[in-house]
């Protein structure tokens, strides 16, 4: 298949945000793959930031990192978890990136003195980035999710760009999907279609007529309701699809398939439909909905109040739990509450089977995390530290097991007598915050006898990083004498990648972010084994 054969599916949203464009797009990708087609997915975000790398998790949720080191929207996590597509910097586009590229061209004189305008220069750059994804590999489909809501001024250049692509390529190669809301008024108990009608009207004013309407609704739309929406929105009745609330996000692909979504898409392009198997996905769904055990995992961080701040962590824990046939309860604990003594660490971790400290930045809540790790280490509670979690584990062990009083990270204390965590030399003079960290897939080799190597089943791995501070190697011998094992090393720079504590039921931490490579059908080995160990400890406590 050549680039000239690639089909494009544009997904827009209306009425309100957070309707699930990312999940519905990822779900369609999964279904199309199971029909035997090769896909890629692009997320186009209307914000002016170059990427979400410098944005607070409270503003934007977690920052998802790709193999090539791009800091991206969390929706790319859904794309990779649900499909076999590998995301890269090309799959994440923002208004900031578009304008940055165009302005740099203008400064170089590439436009030969012409006036630079939104149309055609900005829209041409958006179109180039959409079409370029299909130049790098042979793809059957490129799915493009347009962030924001129709009617937002920020989204207009993206919408104009996809209008132009439809005009240039024709309906044989382009499909427009609009995700909207059909609310139910609790008093009247009936669906209301007017918000959908107004949203489609906004879209049509831009020049885009949707081919498919995905209607978020609490219960299935009646045939009469679908006919009404189709009539007023100029969409075929059969293409008005009920996108129902599901028991879990993992049930969404099955729900959409049962409502004919993937078959309608393939009918539009006159492409072959195959009987779906979804064998691995169904195996996961069965394990997820039919657990045999119970496990309680405490996630201790400072962004606990926002569900999306640790999205990939929570998803990877779910994958690991399902692999162990476990019903997972995530107990979210604000590390500041422990630090400020609003709750004792003993009380916070009572009846907890495992403790996870996720990544993050900044000093707030650090001492609460360190105190929690100390409690887990001394009381035999399985502990999993990720990035900042490794830093806190090293600090705790240095202070309380190796006798390095005042040990700390220079990120939090420049005057510490024992900087066990510090900046690499090439990071000291870095002023810009965006895309300047150690990012993307980096090699890690395990030493002989490392528990990590046993869990992975291999001696060399590549995992994704997002951090600026590292373990200070001059303290390695001191900590090793006290029993800490540096099981994984980056051979290129001789940097510590993992730590583990022999003799403890399960005490491990990674400098990298393993959660980014976990899938429902292929749970990450560390999360799978962490849950296994947590279940075992739970059984021991009860016996």
Image (cartoon, helix red, strand yellow):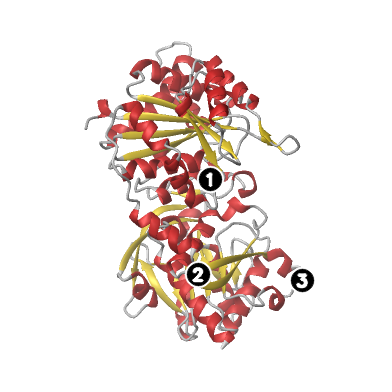
Residue 71 visible in the shown view: no
Helix or strand or loop: what does disc 3 sit on? loop
Q: Nearer the viewer, mark 3 or mark 2?
A: 2
Residue 247 picture location, percent across and down:
55, 52
Outermost residue to the bottom: 543
Residue 43 visible in the shown view: yes
Marked residue nearer the N-terminal end (2 or 1): 1
Residue 223 picture location, percent across and down:
53, 30
The residue under the point 34% across, 48% down is 84
Pick whichever, 501 or 203, lies toward us: 203
Residue 115 picture location, percent across and down:
48, 11
Helix or strand or loop: what does disc 1 sit on? helix
Q: How many marks?
A: 3
Helix or strand or loop: what does disc 2 sit on? strand
What residue is pinned by disc 3? Answer: 341
Q: Is residue 174 left or right of residue 466?
A: left
The crowd level at tag 2 (other Cα within 10 Å; few <14, some 14-19, many 20+) is: many
Tell me the number on the disc at residue 53: 1
Outermost residue to the left: 1
Pick whichever, 164 or 12, lies toward us: 12
What residue is pinned by disc 2? Answer: 326
Q: Is residue 112 left or right of residue 536?
A: left
Marked residue nearer the N-terminal end (3 or 2): 2
Outermost residue to the right: 342
Marked residue nearer the N-terminal end (1 or 3): 1
């Amino acid at each position: 298949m050549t680039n000239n054969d690639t089909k494009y599916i544009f997904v827009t949203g209306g009425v309100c945000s957070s309707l699930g464009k990312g999940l519905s797009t990822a779900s369609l990708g999964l279904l199309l793959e199971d029909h035997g087609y090769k896909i890629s997915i692009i997320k186009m975000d209307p914000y002016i930031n170059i990427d979400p790398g410098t944005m607070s998790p409270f503003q934007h949720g977690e920052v998802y990192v790709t193999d090539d080191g791009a800091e991206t929207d969390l929706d790319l996590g859904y794309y990779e978890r649900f499909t076999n597509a590998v995301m890269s910097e090309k799959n994440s586009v923002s208004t900031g990136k578009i304008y940055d590229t165009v302005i740099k061209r203008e400064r170089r004189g590439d436009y030969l003195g012409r006036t630079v305008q939104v149309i055609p220069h900005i829209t041409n750059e958006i179109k180039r980035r959409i079409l370029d994804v299909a130049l790098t590999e042979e793809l059957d489909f490129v799915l493009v999710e347009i962030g924001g809501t129709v009617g937002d001024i920020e989204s207009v250049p993206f919408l104009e760009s996809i209008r132009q692509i439809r005009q240039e390529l024709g309906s044989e190669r382009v499909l427009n999907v609009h995700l909207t809301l059909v609310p139910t008024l609790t008093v009247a108990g009936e669906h209301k279609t007017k918000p959908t009608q107004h949203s489609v009207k906004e879209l049509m004013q831009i020049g885009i007529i949707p081919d498919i309407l995905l209607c978020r609704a609490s219960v299935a739309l009646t045939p009469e309701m679908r006919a009404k929406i189709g009539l007023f929105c100029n969409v075929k009745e059969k293409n008005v699809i009920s996108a129902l609330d599901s028991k879990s996000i993992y049930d969404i692909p099955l729900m959409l398939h049962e409502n004919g979504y993937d078959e309608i898409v393939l009918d539009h392009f006159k492409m072959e439909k195959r009987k779906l198997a979804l064998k691995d996905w169904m195996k996961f769904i069965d394990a997820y909905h039919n657990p045999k055990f119970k496990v309680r995992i405490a996630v201790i961080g400072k962004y606990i109040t926002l569900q999306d701040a640790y999205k990939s962590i929570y998803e990877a824990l779910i994958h690991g739990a399902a692999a162990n046939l476990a019903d997972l309860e995530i107990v979210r604990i604000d590390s500041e509450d422990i630090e400020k003594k609003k709750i004792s660490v003993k009380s916070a971790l009572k009846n907890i089977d495992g403790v996870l400290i996720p990544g993050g930045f900044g000093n707030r809540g650090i001492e609460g995390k360190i105190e929690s790790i100390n409690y887990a280490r001394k009381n035999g509670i399985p502990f999993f530290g990720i990035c900042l979690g490794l830093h806190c584990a090293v600090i705790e062990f240095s202070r309380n097991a190796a006798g390095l009083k005042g040990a700390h990270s220079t990120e939090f204390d420049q005057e510490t007598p024992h900087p066990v965590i510090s900046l690499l030399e090439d990071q000291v003079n870095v002023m810009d915050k965006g895309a300047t960290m150690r990012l993307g897939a980096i090699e890690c080799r395990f030493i002989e006898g490392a528990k990590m190597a046993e869990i992975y089943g291999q001696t060399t791995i590549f995992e994704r990083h997002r951090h600026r501070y590292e373990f200070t190697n001059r303290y390695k011998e001191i900590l090793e004498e006290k029993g800490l094992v540096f099981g994984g090393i980056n051979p290129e720079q001789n940097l510590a990648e993992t730590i583990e504590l022999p003799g403890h039921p399960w005490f491990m931490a990674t400098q990298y972010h393993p959660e980014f490579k976990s899938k429902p059908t292929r749970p990450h080995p560390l999360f799978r084994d962490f849950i296994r160990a947590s279940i075992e400890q739970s059984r021991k406590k009860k016996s």
